[in-house]
Image (cartoon, rainbow, N blue to C red):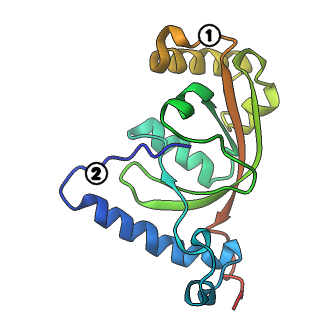
Amino acid sequence: MTDEQTPTQAGAGEVEDLRISAFWQAARGHVGLGKMDAVMGGTPDDVVPPPSWSYGNGPEAEALLARVLAGAKTSTATVLAQLTSAGLEVPRVGDLSIVTDAAGEPKAVLRTTEVQVVPFDQVSEEHVAAEGAAEASHEAWVAEHEASFTAALGDAFTPASEVVLERFEIIYPTSGPTPAVD
């Protein structure tokens, strides 16, 4: 996943960092980390918030986020070349991330539950269904994503290009009280 947010004014990055840090502190109990981990020294992964990212900006990005928050979207696809060109690693099972809205407001902590790297032309109907576009057929999903990936990568994208298929679950917010961990 990538961090597609860009601060729009001086100091916006600091405000965003504070929002992410506060959100992470509230979420830590749901991840199984308690307050004492920060005091006793834990690992940096316990104290430092995981990467934050958004689906971009605009109505389409907000619609994707709404599907995630409703539990209808539990997977995503990214062209491997986009990750590597941005200097990012392929997600791993267990990775955490914070998804934000287009304005940078943190909305959920996600945990990666499954990762596959497959050629674009081998993306399954099961994956497409997990992306939560109930009204879209497999063919419509392929056409939409092929156009998007071609726009981003030009001739470097082909039907044989490898895509990273990532499944995830929301671990915060959840219904019910924060679990006791200290």
* Quadrant including the C terminus: bottom right
Give percent across and percent down for residue 97: 58, 56
Count of numbered labels shown in the rendering: 2
Q: In the image, what residue type sits under mark 2?
A: Pro
The answer to whether residue 93 is above or below residue 118 is: below
Q: Is residue 126 left or right of residue 69?
A: right
Front residue of 145/137: it is 145
Residue ID for mark 1 = 158
Gap in angstroms between the C-alphas marked 2 and 1? 33 Å
User: Considering only vertical position in the picture, is 109 above or below 181?
Assistant: above
Q: What's the amino acid at mark 1?
A: Thr
Whether residue 119 is visible here, answered yes or no, is yes
Q: Quadrant of residue 159?
A: top right
Residue 156 point in image, percent of width and height: 53, 12
Residue 109: image quadrant is: bottom right
Would residue 2 appear left or right of 129 to someone viewing this image? left
Q: Secondary structure at mark 2?
A: loop
Dot 2 crowding, Cα within 10 Å, few <14, some 14–19, many 20+: few
Classify 113 as above or below 176. Answer: above
| Residue 6 at x, y percent in the picture | 32, 46
For disc 2, the marked residue is: 7
Task: Decide if residue 56 is on the left or right side of residue 122.
Answer: left
